[in-house]
């Protein structure tokens, strides 16, 4: 709570390992703006997050960034790259950056991300930015519980249909077509707008119309508009029921994830390992193994 960064780093490691329940129990949640940034690999998420941190700082906020990458042997390099890129902020005491790559065995990232976010919130960060690759259900679930979700696409990644397939159209509050210095940006913008209109025809008119913005993250073009869109989305949340609903959703998701970790934590890990071996060999059904784990 006094701002010691080494303690914070160790606590987040404990969260990743499912060993921070006692600390998490006593947290008083703050009221940060939790922004999820998602989209396909290479779209420019990290480059934009770096700039958004600067915008947030210039507006007088303290900022924490959680860079989430599933622990794939292929993504280690990307995380290292993000760290290097974000070194602009390393001497800034108002910024805290952390990669979460460890899926661990206790609930994985779907537990670790909300728990780390809750910790950062209790410490009093004004803005928490969570960057995650928007491919795969776990990654989509992570941002679903942010206040504001920014979906970053790029012309190269293809049409809005790809975004729709990945489940990104439903979750975006702000859409950004980055790499506007490249060919095809108008096409991608109009694809995304069309997909949004289709969604509205099916689901009814929206209280919040997600803007579709363009940016060039490498030069900073368009970043002011993105920050302004985040601020106005926050204002929308504060002035409607949607903000309360999202906070309630987030608390419920945190409870369910914590319950999962707490339950698994009561089990004897040797028993679980034996059962895992049986399940892998096909001599016991996963469902029977789950019952056995609980009864033993
Ligand atoms: N031409 C161009 N390249 C960009 C732009 N934004 C990011 N990049 C480059 O695209 C690559 C991937 O960017 P990165 O931020 O790591 O993407 P992420 O995987 O979505 O986090 C890097 O080499 C960036 O320098 C842009 O607006 N225009
Ligand atoms: Mg990245």
Image: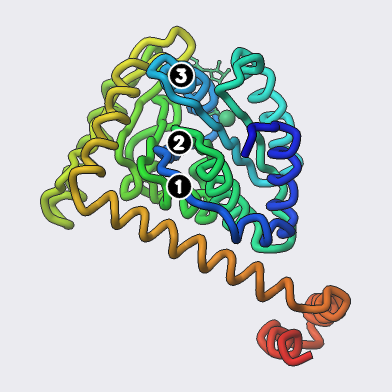
State which mark lies toward you, 3 or 2: 3
Give the spatial CA distance, label 3 vs label 2.
17 Å
**For this rendering, which residue is in front, 189 or 36?**
36
Question: Does 25 appear above or below 62?
Answer: below
Q: Residue at x 58, y 52 (%)?
A: 115
Please rate how many residues cluster around mark 1, counting C-alpha atoms within 10 Å: few if below 14, some from 14 to 19, many from 20: many
User: Which of the two labelled residues, at mark 2 and mark 1, occupies the earlier sequence position?
Assistant: 2
Q: Residue at x 79, y 82 (%)?
A: 282
Q: Which residue is mark 1?
A: 143
Q: Residue at x 81, y 81 (%)?
A: 275
**What label does residue 37 carry, if any?**
2
Please rate how many residues cluster around mark 2, counting C-alpha atoms within 10 Å: few if below 14, some from 14 to 19, many from 20: many
Instruction: Say left or right for 4 vs 197.
Output: right
Q: Dot 3: what SS?
A: helix
Q: Which residue is mark 3?
A: 57
Q: Quadrant of residue 283?
A: bottom right
Residue 42 in the image: state x and y as whole percent: 54, 28
Marker count (numbered): 3
User: Which of the two labelled residues, at mark 1 and mark 3, occupies the earlier sequence position?
Assistant: 3
Q: Are marks 2 and 1 in contact (CB under 8 Å)?
A: yes
Instruction: Say left or right for 240 vs 21.
Output: left
**What label does residue 189 carry, if any?**
none
């Amino acid at each position: 709570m006094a701002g010691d960064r080494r303690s914070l780093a160790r606590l987040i490691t404990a969260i990743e390992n499912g060993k921070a329940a006692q600390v998490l129990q006593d947290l008083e949640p703050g009221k940060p703006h939790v922004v999820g940034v998602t989209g396909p690999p290479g779209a420019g998420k990290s480059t934009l997050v770096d700039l958004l941190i600067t915008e947030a700082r210039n507006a007088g906020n303290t900022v924490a960034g959680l860079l989430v990458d599933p622990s794939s042997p292929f993504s280690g390099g990307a995380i290292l790259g993000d760290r290097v890129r974000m070194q602009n902020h390393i001497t800034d005491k108002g910024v805290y950056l952390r990669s979460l790559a460890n899926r661990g065995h206790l609930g994985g990232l779907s537990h670790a991300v909300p728990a780390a976010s809750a910790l950062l919130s209790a410490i009093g960060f004004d803005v928490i930015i969570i960057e995650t690759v928007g491919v795969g259900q776990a990654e989509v679930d992570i941002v679903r519980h942010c206040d504001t979700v920014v979906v970053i696409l790029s012309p190269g990644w293809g049409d809005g249909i790809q975004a729709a397939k990945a489940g990104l159209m439903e979750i975006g509050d702000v859409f950004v077509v980055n790499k506007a210095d490249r060919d095809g940006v108008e096409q991608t913008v109009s694809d995304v707008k069309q997909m949004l209109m289709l969604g509205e025809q099916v689901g009814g008119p929206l209280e919040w119309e997600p803007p579709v913005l363009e940016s060039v993250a490498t030069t900073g073009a368009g970043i002011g508009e993105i920050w302004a869109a985040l601020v106005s989305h926050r204002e929308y949340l504060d002035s409607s029921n949607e903000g309360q609903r999202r906070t309630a959703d987030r608390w419920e998701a945190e409870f369910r994830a914590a319950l999962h970790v707490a339950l698994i934590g009561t089990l004897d890990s040797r028993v679980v390992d034996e059962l895992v071996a049986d399940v892998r060999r096909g001599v016991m059904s996963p469902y029977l193994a789950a019952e056995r784990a609980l009864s033993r």
